[in-house]
Image (cartoon, rainbow, N blue to C red):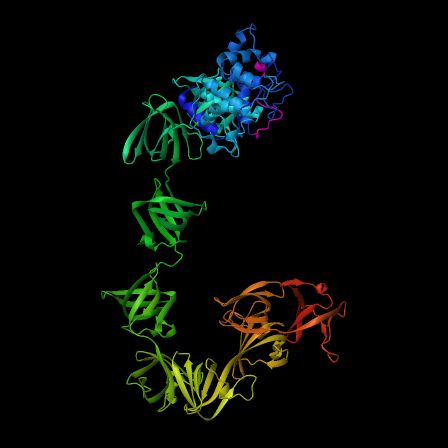
Amino acid sequence: MGKKWKKQLSLGIAASLCLTMVFSAFPPQSAKAAEAEVKTSFTDMSEAHWANKFVSKLALLQVINGYQDGSFKPNQEVSQQDVLLMAIKMMGIDAEAEVEGIAYSIPLFVKDYAREEVYLALKKGLIQVGEEQSLLEDGEEWGTKGASREWVARVLVRALTQEEPIAQVNLNERFGDADEVSAWALPYVKRAVELGLLNGKDGQIAPQMNVTRAEMATLFNQLEPLLEQSLEDVREGRVVSLSGQKIQLQMDGGEVKSYNLHDEVKFFDVDQNKEQISADQIGLYDKVYVIIRHDEVYYVEHLEEAQLNTTEGKFVQLNTDEMNLTLLVDGQYRVFKLSAATTVIDTEENGLNLSNLVPSSKLRVSQNPYEEGNKVVSIDVLEVPVNKTAKGTFESLENDQLNARNLESNETESFDLSEEIRYTYGEKTIEAAQLQSGDLVEYVIVNSVVTAVKLIDPVVPLLETFEGTYIGSEYDAKLGAYFVSLRSENNKPVAYYTDKNIKVQLEGKDKAELNDLISQDRVQVTINEKEDIVAIQILNRSVESKIQQKVLYYNEENGKLLLDSSDTLFVVGPETDITAYGVPIQRSNAGNYLVENKKIDIIYSGNQLMEINITNSYAGTVQKVDTSRKEIQVLGKDGHLHTFKWSSYLVVDLIGSSSATINNVKIGDEVTVILDSNQQFATRVEMSAKKVYTLTGVTPSSSRLEWKDEKGTNTTKYIASNIKITNASGQTITLGELKKDDRLIAFYQGSTLKELRRADGYLGYITSVDTVNSKIQLMTYSGTSVTLTVPSGASLASGDRVEVVKDSFTVAHIMKLESETRTFWKYIGGTTNELHVKKKSVSDQDYIFKLNDDVVFTKDGQLTQVTALKENDKVTLYFYQGELIEVKIS
């Protein structure tokens, strides 16, 4: 056996052993019977047994046998005579014992079946009579005496060499019981440890412990690669082929030999001591160890993987006449020699004919360094060049690669980018940076390289923006679009049609239109891939507003308007919207309203008047109230501060209050200030308010609603046609769409109802409060957990019982439920269905509560049943709109 293999095997096995030492023998199955029968499995040895591999191997080598009943008895201790019997067989010298004859005398007690081997062991120096006799106790029989671990260590070391062993191992550093090693055994134990034959377990070497049969099998397995002479049935080589029936091995000299595999052949790995491996885990030219019996292989042990020389490159050419393969490797052409046995595996790990290799495929060739010529053993196709046009969802451009999810396969695929790749959208060339994740693209692949990417449907519209000067526009009725004339930055005339959803931006105006553009306006224009204008932003002017501007002069013929607060001569044009007290006014009739000293509110851009509003009503948020100066300051909807004075008479209108005064008006309140007919003094402040109601009845035919407020007070209300009714999202609905039990938010201006909005109502208890993000987690009485955004600074805590009413825009109402703590007395079920609590006093009449279907019972934050109540329990009763809604059991 080669030196390289000896080192490999001893190190590999040593690493896997624990307490092993040696193992014992196998009586009365005759040698001839053992030779005739090949047995590797035993009834008391499962494949999961830690020594299964070693027992199978040593049984095949005929070093050990099982018992006639089919067992092996792995835990049975081994006698000294059986250790020697096995050692002689392991050394491959058992034939010498057979020819010695029986004309010898052994001064030790040995049973007949082992006499020849023990005699040969004495002759070979494995044991010495004097040593053995000195170790016997009174009445002990030498041959049947159990073999201790230290005794076995001496036998095995002597099997390797007759020289006095020298070892540098410090047993005390490795084993806590090193002092228990006998003085006569110490050099042998140290050498056995050094060779990896003897190992400890849990820091103990246990020198006096007798070895078992399983341990003996393991030990001899470790001894085998250290012996100079290989056993007759053992072969080593590199796998040339391995099929279901045969294995071909290349021996050290290069000769290839073929062997039949037995039907029950076992495969193991040198580094695994228990489980078998499968044949397909052994690769081409891997090194193996096999045991042959009766011309068949029963045991295969994988020793090491083949170290094949591998090269990757792009397939260029195949010359079958000369059996050459040319690859492009790192920019250089390299030629590889093929053999008749060269195999080709495609990307799906299926066999492939050499002639079916596709040019430009990425290949990996593996060459055999173990035979002359370094020929190619195998070719793996790593990647076949792709040539296709595909559609997919663009994901990214990274490391000079396109990543896209193919629409057909729904899998992401990546391809290198050509240096001359072209990106297009429609008829235009675009930049790679304009592609967005999620875009629908079409990509062209030539030899696995992307040569073109066509943007089909962008996630975000692909737009082009430029600045220019607006000239004018005309409406094209056939196309339903405007034709806009412009001058580009280089003063070149250009024209585009508008998109149907064109947006015009004019600072200060929320809903600007194309008509707001004035010739010579400086603009920024955005066009889409169809070259339609989707947006125009006016750059040179903005929209401003002023209120209570006094008219000095208005010319009805040319629309010129002069105000006392500005030298600008404003123009009232065809697009100017004019309203008087909420009623639209025609421009032709504007002179009747724009009279001298009349105060007006204006919205303008440059000298162009966009809106004129004649009003005595101003809405906004109160910023300041000065009762001494009789002034109220309001931040208007236009974003400007406006100050109004009031005379001695000022009405404050607040829903639900008949005696409100200016003292009820606080900073931050939303109000509408009404001026007198001369637009000089405030005569009325209407305070905005929101109320929450629950509908109890709807009569669409008479436009009437019945509702109750948070206190349970019922009201019947006629709903005028000018009152706006919306759903929670703000969309207009009819009165007939409202239903009983709907929650309504009523918007009041003063005591006048302006709008009713159907809202979402949530009734329950708070389970958590997120003050940072102004959110609460609410468990409703219906058992649903919801997360709600609440006003910043709201005084809420976990455990609060609340009603939250909100629409899609804001929380309109948060009310903590009224509660009282009582002591439970009894529950009366059936049709009575009443909860009785104990009276607070003799005169207490509020101790009986009717339980309707909506009442819930809770305990420790969980819903429960009325049956959970016991007399004298403390309960907290929560009320909603005057009715009991929850009973919390403490």
List the single residue furthest toward the left.
490
Quadrant housing the C terminus: bottom right
Q: Residue shown at 58%/19% (left/top)?
A: 136
Q: Position of residue 439 (x, y in %)?
A: 40, 53
Magenta segment, prevailing SS (helix, strand or loop)? loop
Coordinates of residue 852 in the picture (x, y in percent) = 70, 70
**Split into 4 quadrants, where in the image is the N terminus?**
top left
Q: Which residues are magenta?
A: 34-49
Q: Please say whether residue 757 is one of the residues in the magenta stretch.
A: no
| Residue name at image x 30 percent, y 78 percent | 606
Residue drawn at x 50%, y 83% is 687
User: How many numbered marks have been drawn onto this rendered protein structure?
Assistant: 0
Q: Nearer the viewer, residue 372 or 173?
A: 173
Q: Would residue 300 appear left or right of 144 to someone viewing this image? A: left
Q: Is residue 591 left or right of residue 86?
A: left
Residue 244 makes an appearance in the image: no
Q: Residue 260: x, y in percent?
A: 50, 18
The answer to whether residue 698 shows anywhere in this view is yes
The furthest residue to the top? 103
44 magenta-colored: yes
Given residues 725 and 69, the one toward you in this image is: 69
The image quarter containing residue 348 is top left
How far across and how far down the image is residue 513, in percent? 37, 72
> In which image quadrant can residue 578 be found?
bottom left
Residue 732 lies, with reference to residue 658, above or below; the image says above
